[in-house]
Image: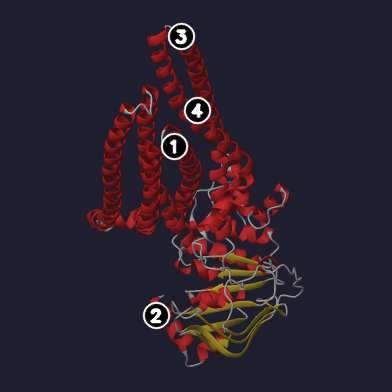
């Protein structure tokens, strides 16, 4: 998405307010030019008074001056009112557009996704779009009108003066266009370095336990200082660039002022301009200079904000390669079939590959064992449709996961991971997650089945307690995850090393809860401790991205394979 299209989409709901803002800005510009014109007639009025003693022109000019000031103040307040009304809504709209889009990317997009950098960029973009519309475009519009009116006034006094003003404005516009590309690159680099610095500090705080335990405070400070130094360098480059523009603009302003004053003096001597014209032109020159100076300042910040928007949009520039399937195919049975499946991440070797068919019947209890990185988690992600195989097919209930709506597919599953992190929300909403329309009674029944209801009821706020991960034990979080699966009426429960971080007593309780799940439900258990899957109907043994053994515990321990090696090692440890 281009910056232009993104900005236009963002401001679409506020076109009426922006139009009114433009009208108000135009009124402000007219009032400013009107002040210069009234000043001319006021001076000429006093000149007439000095010769004739008639103050009529002075009184009329003063009335117009007062009316001009009133209109100017009303227009300023109207602009502020409009900003108060729609700027917060505009920022919200930008945040919503970017943050809602990100959740529709395929799962593999998040493999190298920097969440903290994205969050920083989203808020940076929302501020920049607001600045772009309110501070810059409206100021540019106001400044442009001021320049047009100023040049018109200069021509109205004398053609030569008008040519000087017009040449000044055109030369500045050409210079700005010439410098824009360089400025945009500098702004992009600065925005990227700032978001990277934010991301690095976020990573430090996320791992603060390790920082303190391993005495890493000095190391982290030094490491992050490098990124803050990079940000300083980028900001310095940007500021030097702005300074050079200001030096050029200031030099031109001095030259134009000198040329205009001497030209006016010569015309005044010839009687071609009045004293009021002299005042009008000097004020107009000052107005043009101030507007071009503001243009230079706004232009630098305008380019800076374009860089921020560009950097933020780059984080979501990957096209949505997976079409959002709308077919709501109903999965009636829940047999799982892997057929000649091969999967690899982009640019890497296969991380899972298996020839032939691998079938899991509904209601089976399946154990998955193998060393870290052997392909167990990839196997599960393929089953969930989070990723799709490069070759072959994965089917659930006879339906290819590529061809079914992800919502329809995943409502059949409940996943309880090793670290079942909870949302910082009520326990009620944590259990309801994925079954958002469930009643309170449904939630309580699910919690009872997961043997977590009594604990929740003992809390002061019961189900309305705000869940924070450091306030619950591993076993309590696992039970909340199991309750979530019960509430969803999942047909396939996946336990991804769900007990590996628990103490022995809690582990046995969780295993008992797993065994209490109805026999009609498929249970898939990724286990590091083999005794967790001794009673599985079948155990799949993974090695280097392949399933190398399948059988029951008794069958596998009699084979001279990887499973027996694992079993012998763990038996000796016991």
Between disc 3 and disc 2, the foreground one is 3
First reached walking from the N terminus: tag 4 or tag 1:
4
Vertical position of residue 10 compared to residue 376: above or below: above
First reached walking from the N terminus: tag 1 or tag 2:
1
x, y percent for residue 484:
63, 58
Q: Which label sits on residue 155?
A: 1
Q: Label 4 belongs to which residue?
A: 31
Q: Which label sits on residue 572?
A: 2
**CA gap, disc 2 and disc 4:** 91 Å
First reached walking from the N terminus: tag 3 or tag 4:
4
Can residue 291 be seen in the rendering of this structure?
no
Vertical position of residue 63 compared to residue 29: above or below: above
**CA gap, disc 1 and disc 3:** 28 Å
Q: Are marks 3 and 4 in contact (CB under 8 Å)?
A: no
x, y percent for residue 527:
51, 74
Q: Residues within 10 Å of mark 3 (few under 14, many from 20)?
A: some
Q: Label 3 belongs to which residue?
A: 55
**CA gap, disc 4 and disc 1:** 19 Å
Between disc 2 and disc 4, the foreground one is 4
Q: Of helix, strand and loop, which one carries label 4?
A: helix
**Residue placed furthest toward the front:** 270
Residue at point 49% right, 10% down?
Answer: 56
**CA gap, disc 3 and disc 4:** 24 Å
Q: Are marks 1 and 3 in contact (CB under 8 Å)?
A: no
């Amino acid at each position: 998405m281009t910056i232009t299209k993104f900005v236009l989409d963002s401001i679409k709901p506020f076109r009426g307010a922006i139009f009114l803002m433009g009208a108000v800005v135009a009124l402000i510009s007219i009032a400013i030019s009107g002040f210069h014109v009234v000043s001319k007639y006021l001076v000429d009025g006093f000149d007439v008074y000095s010769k004739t003693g008639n103050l009529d022109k002075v009184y009329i000019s003063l009335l117009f001056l007062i009316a001009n000031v009133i209109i100017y103040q009303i227009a300023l307040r109207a602009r502020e009112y409009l900003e108060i009304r729609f700027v917060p809504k505009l920022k919200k709209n930008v945040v919503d557009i970017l943050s809602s889009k990100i959740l529709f990317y395929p799962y593999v997009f998040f493999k190298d996704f920097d969440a903290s950098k994205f969050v920083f960029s989203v808020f940076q973009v929302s501020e920049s779009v607001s600045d772009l519309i309110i501070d810059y475009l409206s100021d540019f519009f106001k400044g442009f009108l001021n320049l047009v009116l100023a040049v018109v006034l200069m021509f109205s006094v004398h053609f030569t003066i008008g040519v000087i003003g017009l040449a000044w404005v055109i030369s500045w516009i050409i210079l700005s266009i010439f410098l824009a590309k360089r400025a945009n690159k500098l702004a992009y680099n600065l925005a990227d370095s700032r978001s990277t610095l934010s991301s690095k500090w976020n990573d430090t705080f996320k791992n603060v336990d390790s920082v303190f335990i391993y005495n890493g405070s000095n190391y982290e400070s030094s490491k992050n200082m490098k990124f803050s130094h990079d940000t300083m360098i980028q900001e310095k480059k940007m500021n030097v660039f702005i300074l050079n523009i200001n030096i050029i603009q200031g030099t031109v302003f001095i030259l134009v002022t000198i040329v205009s004053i001497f030209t006016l003096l010569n015309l005044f001597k010839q009687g071609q301009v009045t004293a009021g014209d002299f005042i009008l032109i000097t004020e107009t020159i000052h107005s043009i200079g101030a507007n071009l100076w503001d243009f230079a300042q706004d232009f630098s910040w305008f380019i800076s904000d374009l860089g921020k928007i560009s950097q933020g949009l780059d984080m979501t520039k990957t096209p949505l390669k997976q079409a959002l399937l709308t077919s709501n195919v109903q999965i009636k049975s829940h047999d799982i079939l892997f057929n000649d499946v091969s999967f690899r991440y982009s640019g890497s070797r296969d991380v899972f590959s298996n020839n032939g068919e691998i079938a899991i019947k509904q209601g089976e209890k399946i154990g998955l064992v193998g060393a870290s990185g052997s392909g167990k988690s990839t196997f599960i992600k393929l089953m969930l449709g989070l990723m799709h195989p490069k070759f072959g097919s994965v089917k659930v209930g006879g339906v290819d996961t590529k061809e079914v709506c992800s919502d329809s597919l995943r409502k059949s599953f409940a996943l309880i991971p090793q670290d079942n992190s909870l949302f910082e929300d009520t326990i009620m909403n944590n259990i309801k997650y994925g079954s958002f329309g469930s009643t309170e009674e449904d939630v309580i029944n699910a919690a009872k089945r997961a043997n977590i209801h009594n604990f929740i009821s003992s809390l002061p706020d019961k189900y309305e307690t705000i869940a924070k991960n450091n306030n619950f034990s591993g076993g309590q979080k696992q039970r909340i995850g199991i309750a979530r699966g019960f509430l969803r009426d999942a047909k396939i429960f996946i336990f991804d090393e769900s007990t590996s971080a628990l103490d022995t007593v809690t582990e046995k309780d969780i295993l008992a809860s797993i065994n209490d799940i109805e026999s009609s439900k498929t249970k898939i258990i990724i286990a590091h401790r083999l005794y967790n899957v001794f009673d599985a109907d079948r155990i799949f043994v993974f090695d280097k991205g392949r399933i190398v053994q399948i059988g029951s515990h008794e069958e596998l321990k009699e084979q001279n394979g990887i499973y027996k090696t694992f079993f012998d090692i763990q038996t000796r440890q016991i």
